[in-house]
Each structure stands twice: as C-alpha cells, then as structure tokens.
Amino acid sequence: MTAQVDCNHQWAESAVQDMEVEEDYVDTLKDSAEDFLCRLVRNLEIRPSYKITPDYVNTLMRPTESYLCGLEHNIYGIRFVDFCIRSMDAGAERILYAPRLGTLPVPLSDEHRAALGNDAQRFIRYQFGPEFLDIRTVGTGLEFTNGKYAVQHIRMIERHYFRGHLLTSYDFSMPFVMPNSRNTWEMVYSKPELSQEWKDAIVSAPWEVTSDSFYFVNDQLIMHNKAQYNYSH
C-alpha cells in the first residue's frame, strides 16, 4: 500500500509539473500572439489615411518624392544582410556585384547621410559602368533574415526611372517565410532593350537612374527602399 501511495504521489507531482510546463508554453504563445497583435495594430494606426497598394505603386511613372511608409512599418523584422548580382547571359555568366567579394556600394557623403537621417539605412548607390547596359539578363540573390513571426506572401515591386521616364518594372513574390530564419530570394531580371541614344544619355548622367523598391506582405506595404545608379566610366 505504501509503495502504491508513493507511486501515486510521484505521478501527481509529475502531472503537476507537466501542467506547469504546458501553462508556461501556452503563456509564451499567448504573449507572442499578443505582442504581434499589438505591433500589427500599431502598424495599422500609423498607416496613412490612404492605402498604398501594389496596384497603386504599379501606376507610378516617376520616383516618389518621399518614402511611402515609415521604418516602423516593418513589423516582421525583415533585415537584408547580403546580396549578389550576376550576369546570366549565355557565355557571359559572371558575378557583377557581391559585397562579400569586396564589391561595395558607393558610400554616401557626410552631408548626404545627414540629410537622409534615419532613411540612410534604406538608400543605396550602385556603380556599375557602361558595360552593364549591354547585359540582357541579370540574376540577383538577396539574403535576408526574418523575426519571430512567419510571413505569408511577401511581394517586391521594383520600378526604375530615368529623367521622369519609367525604364522598367519588376514584380517578384515569395509565398512563405519561416520565423527566425535566414533566406535567399533568387530573382531574374530581363532588362529592357535600350537604343544607343538612350544608353549614351544614361552613361552621361551619373546617378540620374533611380529605383523605388516596395515590399508588401499580404498587400500591406511594410518597406520602401530607394537606389541610385551610375553607369559612367
């Protein structure tokens, strides 16, 4: 009888411990869900009165004068950590741009960085050279990390402009991103065919080719990055 009582007592203690672990797990899930909902509500509250949609940015024919969302809209904690740009033309495959191999973006001047303020972290300058304009197909590998929330359907729309004209527009999507993960997003760009007159104009106008990159999750804008390009010698 004593052995059975001890066994029952041990079983009861074990059951209580299991219940406490389960309660802790449930509390953790609850806290995580509540935290996410709070961030989501805050994101909705700080949204402008009009909604920036994929359909809207696809109508833009020139670069935006300002950023269409704040840095705080990135409630998923997405952070770009590395990228690679390569030529995919047959017989001319090669890496064109890769920070890990020493090809770095053009640094901003102190004055430019001060003028941008916090937005300097979402602005970049690329020095490519005139030969880049002759490449027809470009591949990019964009590496990024994600926060503790899963991302359903992330979409990037990237539009390139020159002197008030839309040069080209790209639209890429990824169906799912796991939480707390490092990911590589492979994209293939088919570049527009430009006349020699257009190429000469672009080469003679450093930094006048610009782009806006808009990132949406479930059609809600969470990030907006800008870039300038120099194709001169």
Image: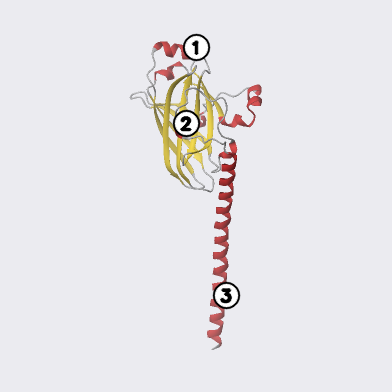
Residue drawn 63% across and 27% down? 116
* Vertical order, 27 against 51 (above or below): below
User: Considering depth in this image, is 230 or 75 the residue closer to the camera?
Assistant: 75
Q: Which mark is residue 56?
A: 2
Q: Secondary structure at mark 3?
A: helix
**The furthest residue to the left:** 90
Quadrant (top left, top right, bottom left, bottom right) of the N terminus = bottom right
Callout 2, which amino acid? Tyr
Relative side of 200 to 48, left or right = left
* Vertical order, 221 against 4 (above or below): above
Q: Which mark is residue 229?
A: none
Colour convention: secondary structure
Between the residue at mark 3 and the residue at mark 2, the CA separation in whole angstroms equals: 60 Å
Which residue is denoted by mark 1 in the rendering? 204
| Foreground label between 1 and 2 | 2
- CB-based contact (under 8 Å), mark 1 and mark 2: no
Callout 1, which amino acid? Ser
- CB-based contact (under 8 Å), mark 3 and mark 2: no
User: Considering depth in this image, is 11 or 58 the residue closer to the camera?
Assistant: 58
Q: Secondary structure at mark 2?
A: helix
User: Considering depth in this image, is 173 or 145 the residue closer to the camera?
Assistant: 173
Which residue is denoted by mark 3 in the rendering? 13
Between the residue at mark 1 and the residue at mark 2, the CA separation in whole angstroms equals: 31 Å
The image shows residue 193 at horizontal and vertical percentages of: 37, 19
The image shows residue 150 at horizontal and vertical percentages of: 49, 47
The image shows residue 114 at horizontal and vertical percentages of: 66, 26
Residue drawn 60% across and 39% down? 46
Q: Secondary structure at mark 1?
A: loop
* Vertical order, 135 against 173 (above or below): above
The image shows residue 161 at horizontal and vertical percentages of: 47, 21
| Foreground label between 3 and 1 | 1
User: Mark 3 or mark 1: which comes first in sequence?
Assistant: 3
